[in-house]
Image (tube, rainbow, N blue to C red):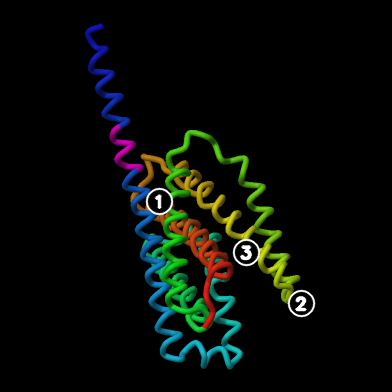
Amino acid sequence: MADYQPRVQAAQAGAQDIDAGLRSYMLSVYNYMAGALVLTGVVAYFSAASGLYASIAQSPLIWVVMLAPLGMVIFLSARLNKLSLAGAQTSFWVFAALMGLSLSSVFLVYTQQSITQVFFVTAAAFGSLSLYGYTTKRSLSGMGSFLFMGVIGIIIAMIVNIFLQSSALEFAISVIGVLVFAGLTAYDTQKIKEMYFAGDGVATMGKKAIMGALKLYLDFINMFLFLLRLFGSRD
């Protein structure tokens, strides 16, 4: 019994260290994500306001602008572990800037008031869902395959609707899109939390945070765009 109390204290100290490390890791994830959203918004606004996007839209470069963010997502997903932390950070910020350029059309199609309103609605919904994913004791792993199939279904439906131009199908896609990316927000948050390992070095932890931020950033952006299609006021 003499050494029981020191063992309990050591266990408690270890748990506190893990909790502090996890909080720091998750804060880093959210900071990266928030920074990327700010950068995307600034680039999108000034590209639209300056006429840069309108000029690009009239040239073949528009295809580069539209496809470059997808290329960066694929690159980061495939090469992140082989990049240095500085290289991963640079790639992440380049991706956020390219996303801003590709999303400049939002400021040309919708009113600034509706963009602002939908952004704050998305932020509130995202925050609640991410908090649920972080705090729930229930495993959300069973949702993964269902949500992935939902994303594939949305992509196929959007391609089909390019030819059909159906307003009813567009509405259905937007509603389903909001629900799918709402689910992914909670699911990804839990998975990002589970990625944490106290023994990781600074570089490994930093790259995990960047990958987590990328996932949550994509969840937020897609939820925002689908909500904007549902509730945004067009110019």
Q: Specify few, some or many for label 1: CA neighbours under 10 Å numbering under 14, 14-19, or 20 or more.
A: some
Q: Secondary structure at mark 1?
A: helix
Magenta-highlighted stretch: main secondary structure?
Answer: helix
The reply to whether the magenta stretch includes residue 17 is yes
Q: Secondary structure at mark 3?
A: helix
Q: Which residue is mark 2?
A: 163
Q: Which residue is mark 1?
A: 204
Q: Are marks 3 and 1 in contact (CB under 8 Å)?
A: no
* Alpha-carbon span between mark 1 and mark 2: 45 Å
On the image, the x and y values in percent for residue 48 come to 45, 85
- Can residue 82 be seen here? no
Q: Which residue is mark 3?
A: 174
Three-letter amino acid code at the position of disc 2: Phe
The reply to whether the magenta stretch includes residue 157 is no
Location of the N terminus (image quadrant): top left
Three-letter amino acid code at the position of disc 1: Thr
Which numbered disc flags the more N-terminal residue, 3 or 2?
2
- Can residue 103 be seen here? yes
Drawn side of residue 155 relative to residue 65, left or right: right
101 in relation to 75, above or below = below
Which numbered disc flags the more N-terminal residue, 3 or 1?
3
